[in-house]
Amino acid sequence: DAGVIQSPRHEVTEMGQEVTLRCKPISGHNSLFWYRQTMMRGLELLIYFNNNVPIDDSGMPEDRFSAKMPNASFSTLKIQPSEPRDSAVYFCASSLAQRGYYNEQFFGPGTRLTVL
Amino acid sequence: AQKVTQAQTEISVVEKEDVTLDCVYETRDTTYYLFWYKQPPSGELVFLIRRNSFDEQNEISGRYSWNFQKSTSSFNFTITASQVVDSAVYFCALSEARTGNQFYFGTGTSLTVIP
C-alpha cells in the first residue's frame, strides 16, 4: 500500500519566491496534518484537516502561510513570500479518525525546504 | 504548558546495552492515547506503538517494550540489547479525546548506539 506521498522532496528557493508543498494522504484516511520540524523548535503542528475541512490552524506562523485541501486525496501548503527562517523540513501526515477512537498518524517522507 | 515531556535530550549507549527512554505526559482527560515514533537519520517518522488510557498492560515487541503507568503519568520505552540500527530520535506523543485527533509531541530523545 502506498504511504503518504509528498512532493517535492527537496526545494531550494530564493527569498521572496512562492513555495508550494504537496501531499497525498493514504487512501481512506480522513484527517491530514502539516508539521514543520527545525532544530530550534522541534516538531510543530501547523494545521490539520478533518474531512477536508481545516480544524485548527493556530500553528500557522503568519499570513504568509496558507493550506488547502480541495479533496480527500490532495493538500497543499503554500508560503508566499518565502523567507530564510522558513527553512525546515515540512511533514504531511494522515490518519483515520473515528469517533471516540484515535488512530496513529502516518507520516510522509517530508519536504526539505531551503530558502536562500 | 508542555503536555509531553521527554527529559532526556540525548542518550548514548554501547551496543547490546539496554536503554530506557522516558516519557511523562499531562492531561485532564480520562480518555487519551499515547504513541511512540522513531525518526532514524534518514528523516522519516515511523510509528512504533499506540496505547489507550484504559489499557495499562505493558507491551513487548521483540527487543522493544513499553511500560505504561497512569499513576505516574509515564509511558516509558525500553530497548533491550540495543543495536546500531536503533540509533534515532524517538518521539512520544499524546492525543486527547476532547481535542480530537491532534497530537502533542514531546521534544524527542536522540539515541546513539555505539558499536
Image: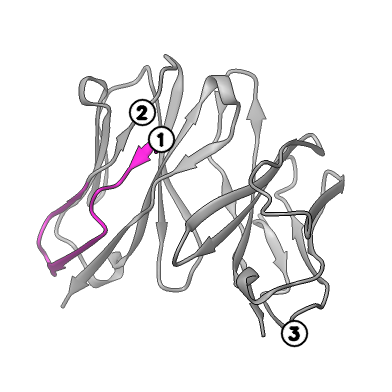
Label 2 is placed on what type of residue?
Glu
* Circle on res. B54: none
Element at badge 2?
loop
Q: CA distance from mark 3 to mark 2?
A: 41 Å
Q: Which residues are magenta?
A: B1-21
Q: Answer whether residue B4 is magenta in the image.
A: yes
Front in this rendered view, residue B15 or A47: A47
Q: Are marks 3 and 2 in contact (CB under 8 Å)?
A: no
Label 3 is placed on what type of residue?
Glu
Front in this rendered view, residue A53 or A64: A64
Give the letter of the chain under mark 1: B
* Circle on res. B1: 1
Give the letter of the chain under mark 3: A
Quadrant for residue A112, please give it.
bottom right
Q: Is residue A59 left or right of residue B41?
A: right
Query: Residue beneath label 2, please?
Result: B26
Q: Is residue A109 left or right of residue B93?
A: right
Question: Which mark's residue is nearer the viewer, 3 or 2?
Answer: 3
Residue at left offset 67%, top offset 85%: A116
Query: Residue beneath label 3, please?
Result: A14
Element at badge 1?
loop
Q: Residue B5: in sight, yes or no?
A: yes
Give the letter of the chain under mark 2: B
Q: Are marks 3 and 1 in contact (CB under 8 Å)?
A: no
**Which residue, as the protein is rendered here, is positioned at the far right?**
A70
Q: CA distance from mark 3 to mark 1?
A: 36 Å
In this rendering, the answer to whether B27 lies above or below A50 is: above
